[in-house]
């Protein structure tokens, strides 16, 4: 079967879904190919056991590590991609992230474009994804052409207290930017109910600003947009010159189907986009499509992260906890010459989630029990930038499977950030409140399978020898192939990546509109 479209977009997540949304109003014939289905609305959406313990929404994919050992990557194949499960912390990269930065383990390279180039697209993405925030609180924030479209999500009392204590201690806590459809001024009509099962869970009431709800669903009634679910793209075929993608090969319901588009945009997540290109090797592209530079699959990044639960005697009854951020250690400080990263809150622990995330946490269960522990925990997410190392890479084997080779970078910076967090917590008086026992912290290093923030396998740049894509995210070696997910990142910064993928998709959308006329 062969069908023709103006644009074929592969993958409906932050990159692909947003691009489809942007291009839909052009009237061009658009085909959106998504290997997953719509995520079912069911009570399990908001139940920690199925979500965190049973991995109900994690794909059954098998990937392999450097030793050939198989693991189940935490990837999510649904309309909307990883954004269905994301925490919706929608940060802009900081202006310095677009330049070269020295780190303990090497250099984070400059982007070919600046913060100023991205700024209008960040604003547009914030509007589309209804980002709530409060400009001017975070000193590391770049200049903005417009305020956040929605006021910041308020802190609940425990977080307000932590924020106040931090400010008194000379830190600069800020309201974290957040893409939830919460209208605090009109709660009876607010779509978001401000619940405790947001970060890492799908939203049962469709109030999370994810790519499914915000970008894809509004397109379904349009006659010029076709969404095919259950459509796994396995390979891209080119004409004899190797310059033009002429066939998008899909496996659907056990059948092989081929679609043709004047423009093809791959947006299947950093690892899977590399997989598709590598598995599309041909005579003209013997090392994989668009891979004359041998860069496809290299420079895989996924952040050097830790989830940390700080316990104190005081209860933490916060429901929606992801409201606070701290960037005082984002750049080098007077005490440490390298950047350490971002501190933010992560979804509130509950006993089941803790059991699922880290079985060894149960070591103290006899004393407190997981329920007590969860009720007293304040949960932080620490993000340190990891570096684009060429040897950290995705490759595929003869069967087309993903192999992921990663050596973590900037562990020293991540360790310093953790020490700073401990200092902060003592500073806020949490230790003083903790009359009977010393505060203790639980540190969850994310393993290879925790690829939520994957990026960088097809970086963009001006030099075809060192990058896969040009600055429009078009493959240097092809005339009609684009990659529009987090693959294009030349470096990842230390804030969550989704807003940058969304902003970039809008930027590339504008380019494609001009190109198509
Ligand atoms: C639990 C969790 C929490 C997160 N929290 C945050 C957060 O708070 N803030 C933030 O900024 N980021 C967060 N992220 C990361 C964020 O979701 C990703 O950075 C973002 O979704 C990446 O966008 P993408 O377009 O690259 O990939 P995705 O959004 O994953 O989209 C890829 C799409 O391609 C589809 N696909 C894959 N292979 C194929 C194929 N062969 N054929 C067809 N379709 C295919 C997938 O099903 C998917 O729909 C989180 C992620 C997770 C998992
Ligand atoms: S907090 Fe709001 S957006 Fe998040 S899951 Fe609950 S209702 Fe949905």
Image (cartoon, grey):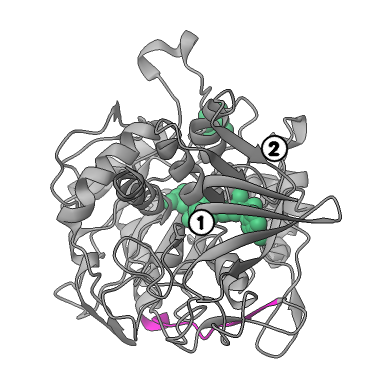
Quadrant holding the C terminus:
top left
Q: Give the residues drawn in magenta, as a range.
A: 402-412
Q: Circle 1 is placed at which residue position? A: 264
How far from the left and from the top, in percent, is residue 183? Answer: 40, 19
Residue nearer the viewer, 306 or 21? 21
Residue 164 in view, yes or no = yes
Say which element carries label 1.
strand
Image quarter for residue 103? bottom left
CA neighbours of label 2 inside 10 A, class few (<14), some (14 to 19), many (20+): some
Task: Identify which residue is drawn at 75% across, 53% down.
Answer: 55
Please tell me which of labels 1 and 2 falls first in the chain: 2
Query: Seen in the image, is 231 located left or right of residue 481?
Result: right
How far from the left and from the top, in percent, is residue 348? Answer: 55, 44
Ligand 1 lies under 8 Å from the Cβ of mark 1:
no
Up/down of 38 relative to 453, above or below: above
Task: Identify which residue is drawn at 54% across, 50% down.
Answer: 9
Image quarter for residue 184? top left
Please tell me whether mark 1 or mark 2 is closer to you in this view: 1
Spatial CA span between label 1 and label 2: 23 Å
Query: Seen in the image, is 416 located left or right of residue 248?
Result: left
Q: Is residue 406 magenta?
A: yes
How far from the left and from the top, in percent, is residue 113? Answer: 21, 64
Say which element carries label 2.
loop
Residue sitting at the far front: 240
Q: Circle 2 is placed at which residue position? A: 38
How far from the left and from the top, in percent, is residue 467? Answer: 36, 78
CA neighbours of label 1 inside 10 A, class few (<14), some (14 to 19), many (20+): many
Residue 196 in view, yes or no = no
């Amino acid at each position: 079967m062969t069908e023709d479209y103006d644009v074929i977009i592969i993958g409906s997540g932050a990159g692909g879904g947003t691009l489809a949304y942007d291009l839909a109003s052009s009237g061009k014939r658009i085909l959106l190919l998504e290997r997953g289905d719509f995520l079912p609305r069911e009570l399990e959406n908001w139940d920690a056991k199925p979500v965190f313990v049973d991995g109900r929404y994690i794909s059954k994919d098998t990937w392999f590590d450097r030793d050939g050992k198989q693991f189940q990557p935490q990837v999510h194949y649904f309309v909307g991609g990883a954004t269905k499960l994301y925490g919706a912390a929608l940060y802009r990269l900081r202006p310095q992230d677009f330049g070269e930065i020295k780190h303990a383990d090497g250099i984070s390279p400059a982007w070919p474009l600046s913060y100023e180039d991205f700024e209008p697209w960040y604003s547009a993405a914030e509007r589309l994804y209804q980002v709530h925030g409060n400009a001017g609180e975070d000193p590391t924030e770049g200049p903005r052409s417009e305020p956040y479209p929605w006021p910041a999500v308020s802190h609940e009392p425990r977080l307000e207290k932590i924020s106040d204590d931090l400010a008194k201690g000379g830190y600069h806590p800020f309201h974290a930017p957040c893409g939830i459809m919460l209208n605090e001024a009109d709660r009876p009509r607010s779509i978001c109910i401000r619940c405790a099962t947001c970060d890492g869970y799908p939203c049962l009431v469709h109030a999370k600003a994810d790519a499914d709800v915000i970008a894809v669903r509004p397109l379904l009634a349009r006659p010029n947009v076709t969404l095919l679910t259950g459509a796994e793209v396995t390979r891209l075929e080119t004409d004899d010159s190797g310059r033009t993608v002429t066939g998008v090969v899909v496996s659907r319901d056990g059948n092989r189907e081929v679609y043709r588009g004047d423009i093809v945009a791959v947006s299947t997540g950093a690892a899977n986009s590399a997989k598709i290109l590598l598995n599309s090797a041909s005579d003209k592209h013997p090392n994989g499509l668009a891979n004359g530079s041998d860069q496809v699959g290299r420079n895989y990044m996924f952040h050097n992260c830790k989830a940390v639960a700080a316990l104190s005697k005081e209860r933490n009854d916060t429901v929606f906890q992801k409201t606070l951020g701290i960037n005082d250690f984002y750049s080098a400080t007077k005490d440490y010459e390298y950047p350490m990263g971002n501190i933010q809150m992560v979804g509130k622990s509950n006993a089941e989630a803790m059991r699922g995330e880290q079985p060894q946490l149960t070591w103290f269960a006899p004393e407190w029990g997981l329920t007590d522990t969860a009720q007293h925990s304040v949960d932080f997410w620490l993000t340190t930038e990891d570096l684009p190392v060429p040897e950290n890479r995705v490759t595929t084997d003869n069967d087309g499977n993903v192999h992921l080779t990663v050596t973590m970078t900037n562990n020293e910076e991540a360790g310093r950030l953790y020490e700073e967090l401990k200092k902060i917590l003592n500073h806020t008086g949490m230790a003083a409140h903790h009359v009977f026992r010393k505060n203790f912290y639980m540190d969850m290093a994310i393993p290879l399978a925790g690829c939520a923030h994957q990026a960088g396998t097809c970086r963009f740049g001006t030099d075809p020898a060192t990058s896969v894509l040009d600055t429009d995210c078009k493959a240097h070696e092809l005339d009609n192939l684009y990659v529009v997910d987090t693959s294009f990142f030349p470096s990842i910064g230390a804030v969550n990546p989704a807003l940058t993928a969304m902003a970039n998709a809008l930027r590339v959308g504008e380019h494609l509109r001009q190109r198509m006329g």
